[in-house]
Amino acid sequence: MLQSFSQVTEDILCHPKFQALRYSEHHGGENTLFDHSVDTAKCAYRLAKRFRLKEERIEAVTRAALLHDFFCYDWRSPSHQRYVRRYAGLQRLRRMHAFTHGALAARRASRLFPMDERQRAAIKSHMFPLAPLPRSSEAWILTLADKIVASREMSAAVGYHMRRWYHKVVPAH
């Protein structure tokens, strides 16, 4: 019998390093990396069920989705920006966060949680087309779920910033 979302993800959600994602801003506005990861995992879980994947594959894609952004660094920090600026041209582009964080997240997640190669590959490719081509149904579902959730978050962030701008420009009556 298929486990519930909370049963599939409980060990990850309770881990202190994963809990620390609550303090990392993501996609602007009021969204955190924790929120984004949980929302992406819930979306992937629903998509995998809708596509009638086998139970073990639903669990695999859900766990991979929860860990897809488990890169554990602030890519906006001055130290990371200095690291990227040490390179020029194509080398700089290849070291930018959007291109590298999938592989880093897969490596760091596999140190703390049991993962198979399909899950690691799904995490590595979730930024397609900036990352390798997804090669399994889990990888495609994770990529789709991440794009759905990120689009929703970016739309909310634009609205958040527009409201802040509006209240500065238009005085309250």
Image (spheres, rainbow, N blue to C red):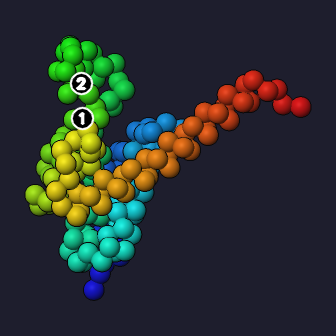
In the picture, measured across the screen, residue 158 lies left or right of residue 76, that is: right
Q: Which mark is on residue 99?
A: 1
Residue 108 visible: no
* Displayed quadrant of residue 100: top left
Q: Which mark is on residue 130?
A: none
- Residue type indicated by callout 1: Phe
* Displayed quadrant of residue 103: top left
State the residue at coordinates (27%, 86%): 1
Question: Of residues 12 and 119, which is closer to you in this image?
Answer: 119
- Which percent across, then down, holds residue 155? 54, 43
State the residue at coordinates (36%, 68%): 47
Q: Which mark is on residue 93?
A: 2
Task: Give the structural element (helix, strand or loop) at label 2.
Answer: helix
Position of the C terminus by quadrant: top right
- Residue type indicated by callout 2: Leu
* Labels 2 & 1 near each other (Cβ < 8 A): yes
Task: Give the structural element (helix, strand or loop) at label 1.
Answer: helix
- Which percent across, then down, holds residue 141? 30, 61
Please identify the residue farthest to the right as the structure is shown. 173
Question: Of residues 73 and 55, which is closer to you in this image?
Answer: 55
